[in-house]
Each structure stands twice: as C-alpha cells, then as structure tokens.
Amino acid sequence: MRFAVTSQNFRTVTGHAGMTRRFLVFQASVPDEVAEVSRLDLPKEMAFHEFAGEAHPIDGVDVLLTGSAGEGFHRKMAARGIRVVVTGQADPVEAVREVLAGRTTPPAPHEHEGGCGCGGKH
C-alpha cells in the first residue's frame, strides 16, 4: 500500500490537509516494513484547497494520513479513490504503522484560536 502523510515540516504529521503542499510518501504492507519512498513539495496552486486540475501528484496513494481535514477534503479524496485517515499520532512512520495494524491515535480537539481560517470545519 502507498501512504501519503501531510507534513509541512517533513518531520511530523501536520493538519489542514486541504492546504498542505508537503507530503511524505511511504510504501508498506506490514507494520514492520514502512519505507519512505518520496517527498512532495508542491507549489501553492497544487494544494487541494486551490487545485482544480485532473491529475495530481498525490494520485495513486491508497491512504492519506493527516492531523485534520474537513468533510470537503474527505469527499475530494474519496472521488480520487484515496481513503483519508485523521490521526493524533505526530510521528509519520508510527501513523502508517497504526493504520496497517488497524488502529489510529485519536486526533486532538481542533483549536480555532488565532484565526486558522478553516471556518470551524474541523
């Protein structure tokens, strides 16, 4: 299976999936064999919040892991055949391992302080 993990800093799982432009891509079939295969650092117009094209570099992954995502993002990814999993796990490799083991760390409650711009959709 191929996994994409939203990671604006290429170290931790980050949220706001529709606005994310950086992804870690992993290949794995069992929890003990998770391998990073690429990193995507996309231009602003390739963030799904802005994207209006057909083909996207994230196409072909089976699961997209993120710290937060709105319902619109879930629908967009489902239309591409990608399952979205929201996790509270900060470590990307551990997040992939959890999904492979059939569990996920519950996400922390989303804070709207500071004007994240999501309009309370998380």
Image: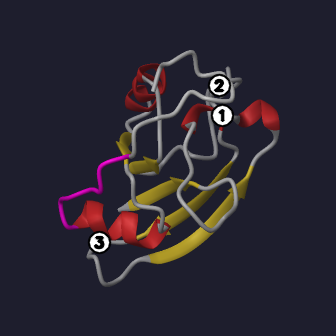
Q: Residue 51 carries which label?
A: none
Q: In which quarter of the image is the N terminus?
A: bottom left
Which residue is tagged 3? 29
Q: Do the residues labelled 3 and 2 touch (CB within 8 Å)?
A: no
Q: What element carries label 1?
A: helix
Residue 82 left/right relative to 5: left
Whether 104 is drawn above or below 57: the answer is below
Q: Distance between the residues labelled 3 and 1?
A: 28 Å
Q: Which of marks 3 and 2 is in front?
A: 2
Magenta-drawn segment: 101-107
Q: Which amino acid does label 3 sit on?
A: Ser
Which residue is tagged 2? 49
Q: Which amino acid does label 1 sit on?
A: Met
Q: Which of marks 3 and 2 is nearer the N terminus?
A: 3
Q: Where is residue 3 in the image (x, y as percent from the top left)?
A: 44, 58
Residue drawn 48% across the image and 27% down it: 73
Which residue is tagged 1? 19
**Nearer-the-camera pick, 89 or 49:** 89
